[in-house]
């Protein structure tokens, strides 16, 4: 922790000033001893002439009284300083408590670790417990241990140490932020580390809550947009279709008249052609819209794993709400891809939400997400698998057709759009059964940067 | 077209629908008047011709259902058939509750539309006949003097001439004279017909 900016008086200074005060008092008393003439003062006797024995006696009395008084004063002021030290320690302690912020020091040469009271409290370790690096790393959530350990080793090499990670305290997960500075000796060897650790659980829960709300909002917007869109589309297509049908049936009736009114029939057929064109325009407009949404808007070099993590963050609320267990296996050293992060996230989110919806009535719903190197021809594969009821054999190819849906209120657009996006990225999307268990497995293959379009 | 040929009022903002629907109805022998907006359709005298209205539910400005409510307030309200591009079940239920003859989603088959129109016209004929009878009955009743009207009300409540005379403070003979005039003016020959006519004209029997 930084020193408070208000300059504090040194605790040594009151001791010196008390000593000075005691000396001054002593001299004053000696002088008073000379000057005070009690018989003259209290009984009105004529002032006594200066007399050596009397002066010596008085001085002796003054010394006898003054020296202990001086010593007492010095003692008292010493205690004052101790009290102030204790107060400052208490102040520091209280400040750490209020900020949920503890400080620590690690002497690397001696291997000694010091924790402030607040660190003991934060980590749920009884004060006075012998401290080692392992005391700390054992409290870190197993999933975060490797990250924390790696960060600290990098700090010892001269890297910055400013991390956020989780700790497990009495079965409860807390988020902490850690910052530290490492001091090095002339030869560049790390000798000491000084740092702080702060409880940021409230902030993290607020962030998670915000992310959950955002995900919910995204979901609602997505559903609302689709249903509005489908209703508008139905209307746009129904108008010309209704006109064509009525015209054709009117024409059939006019044909029964003898002789048929050929001019009327010609007019009807012209209208049928025009209305058909109108329906075609609606479909072309729709295609155009898909192309635009699947177009190359903002292609950049991307890592696949962070995309998957983003999507999991967004879907976290849904996963928890539906009690779906999650299995992730994100490969390391994967090549980067070229694409639009927003679109690829949309595709992944769509697959994840589809999976969650498919597992609505599954007793042990499990979602698994994997990334790995492409099996043939390089690139990256992203796999989204669920344990839902799966799909009927033969439906695999129809799944990606527009307007094909197995959902009660689905419009059958999600997978069609997803495929358009993946293909615009030079990739492929495929579907199969989920191995031994029930469910579906979607595999997206994207070309590595430089390989693709 | 003869004076009694049915006329169908079609209100839809889509020109293709107006044209094709009116063609289909003409092929079935109906006369059609088309309107692009609710505001274009105003009540007018179509005389004795049966009529009905085909309203698009999704009209710009006021909805088809609102227009339907306006039409129901006409002196001679035409029966209504709704057509819709994306109407849902609740909307259809609401329309039927408000007295619509049918609620057809587009695209519809010719038979569905013509069938609905035939039913609407039949309903119009029946309800118009009923309205006409009421009007005629009221016209006849309007010709009665106040004393004759009072006599009518006592007669249809089943009182004897003697009782009516006591009630009105006149002799039984005078009651008989009034009664004879009432029968003549209302063009009926039996008390049963008299009761039926009074009911049609909405005259309540005298109480007491």
Image: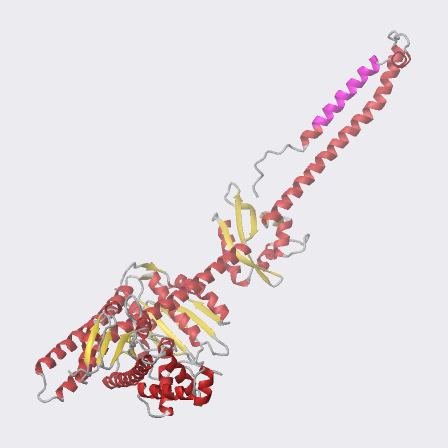
Left/right of residue A278 with respect to residue A307 in the rendered view = left
Q: Residue at x 66, y 40 (%)?
A: A88
- In the picture, measured across the screen, residue A66 lies left or right of residue A373, that is right
Q: Is residue A160 above or below residue B8?
A: above
State the quadrant of the N terminus of chain B. bottom left
Taking depth in this image into account, of A224 and B180 the one nearest to the observer is B180
- Corner quadrant of residue A336: bottom left
Report x, y in % for residue B15. 20, 72
* Residue nearest the viewer, comparing A409 with A342: A409
**Residue A22 inside the magenta-drawn segment:** yes
The spot of residue A111 in percent (x, y) is 61, 50
The spot of residue A172 in percent (x, y) is 59, 62
Mark yes or no: residue A35 visible. Answer: yes
Q: Is residue A79 magenta?
A: no
Looking at the image, residue B5 lies above or below residue A422: below
> Is A223 drawn above or below residue B113 in the view shown?
above
Is residue A376 in view? no
For the rendered model, the colour scheme is secondary structure
Position in image of residue A142 (x %, y %): 54, 63
Observer-nearest residue: A432 or B156? B156
Residue placed most toward the observer, B84 or B78? B78
Is A37 displayed left or right of A289 in the figure? right
**Magenta stretch in the rendered image:** A16-35
- Report which quarter residue B124 is drawn in: bottom left
Q: Residue at x 35, y 88 (%)?
A: B180
Left or right for A263, reference A194: left
What predominant SS class does the magenta segment belong to?
Answer: helix
């Amino acid at each position: 922790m930084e020193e408070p900016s208000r300059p504090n008086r040194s605790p040594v200074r009151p001791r010196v000033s008390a000593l000075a005060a005691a000396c001054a008092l002593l001299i004053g008393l000696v002088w008073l001893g000379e000057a005070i003439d009690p018989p003259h003062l209290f009984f009105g006797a004529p002032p006594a002439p200066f007399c050596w024995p009397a002066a010596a006696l008085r001085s002796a009395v003054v010394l006898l009284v003054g020296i202990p008084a001086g010593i007492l004063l010095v003692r008292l002021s010493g205690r004052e300083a101790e009290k102030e030290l204790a107060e400052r320690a208490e102040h520091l302690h209280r400040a750490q408590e209020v900020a949920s912020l503890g400080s620590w020091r690690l002497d690397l040469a001696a291997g000694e670790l010091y924790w402030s009271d607040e660190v003991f409290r934060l980590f749920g370790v009884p004060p006075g417990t012998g401290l080692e690096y392992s005391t700390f790393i054992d409290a870190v959530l197993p999933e975060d241990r490797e990250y924390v350990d790696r960060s600290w080793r990098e700090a010892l090499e001269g890297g910055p140490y400013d991390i956020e990670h989780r700790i497990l305290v009495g079965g409860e997960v807390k988020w902490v932020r850690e910052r530290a500075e490492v001091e090095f000796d002339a030869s560049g060897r790390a000798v000491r580390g000084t740092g702080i650790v702060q409880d940021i659980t409230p902030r993290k829960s607020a962030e998670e809550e915000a992310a959950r709300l955002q995900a919910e909002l995204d979901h609602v917007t997505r559903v609302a947009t689709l249903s509005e869109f489908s209703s508008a589309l139905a209307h746009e297509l129904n108008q010309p279709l209704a006109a064509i049908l009525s015209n054709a049936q009117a024409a059939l009736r006019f044909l029964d008249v003898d002789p048929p009114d050929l001019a009327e029939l010609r007019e009807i057929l012209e209208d049928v052609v025009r209305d058909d064109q109108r329906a075609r325009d609606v479909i072309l407009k729709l295609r155009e819209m898909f192309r635009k949404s699947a177009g190359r808007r903002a292609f950049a070099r991307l890592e696949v794993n962070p995309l998957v993590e983003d999507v999991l963050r967004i879907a976290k609320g849904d996963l928890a709400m539906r009690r779906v267990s999650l299995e992730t296996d994100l490969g390391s050293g994967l090549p980067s891809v070229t694409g639009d992060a927003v679109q690829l996230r949309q595709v992944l989110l769509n697959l994840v939400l589809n999976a969650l919806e498919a597992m609505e009535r599954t007793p042990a719903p499990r979602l698994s997400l994997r990334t790995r190197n492409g099996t043939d021809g390089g690139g990256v594969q992203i796999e989204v698998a669920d344990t839902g009821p799966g799909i009927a054999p033969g439906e695999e190819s129809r799944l990606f057709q527009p307007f094909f849906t197995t959902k009660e209120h689905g419009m059958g657009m999600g997978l069609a759009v997803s495929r358009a996006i993946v293909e615009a990225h030079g990739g492929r999307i495929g579907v199969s059964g989920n191995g031994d268990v029930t469910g579906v497995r979607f595999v997206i293959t994207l070309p590595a940067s430089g390989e693709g379009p | 077209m003869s004076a009694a040929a049915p006329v169908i009022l079609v209100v839809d903002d889509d020109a293709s629908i107006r044209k094709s629907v009116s063609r289909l109805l003409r092929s079935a022998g109906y006369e059609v008047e088309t309107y692009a907006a609710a505001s274009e359709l105003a009540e007018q005298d179509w005389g004795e011709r049966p009529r009905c209205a085909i309203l698009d539910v999704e009209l710009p400005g006021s909805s088809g259902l609102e227009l339907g409510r306006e039409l129901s307030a006409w002196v001679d309200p035409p029966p209504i058939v709704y057509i819709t591009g994306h109407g849902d079940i609740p909307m259809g239920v609401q329309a039927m509750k408000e007295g619509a003859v049918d609620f057809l989603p587009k695209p519809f088959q010719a038979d569905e539309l013509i069938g609905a129109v035939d039913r609407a016209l039949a309903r119009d004929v029946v309800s118009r006949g009923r309205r006409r009878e009421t009007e005629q009955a009221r016209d006849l009743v309007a010709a009665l003097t106040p004393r004759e009207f009072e006599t009518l009300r006592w007669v249809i409540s089943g009182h004897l001439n003697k009782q009516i005379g006591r009630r009105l403070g006149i002799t039984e003979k005078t009651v008989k004279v009034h009664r004879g005039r009432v029968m003549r003016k209302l063009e009926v020959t039996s008390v049963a017909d008299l009761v039926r006519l009074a009911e049609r004209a909405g005259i309540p029997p005298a109480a007491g």
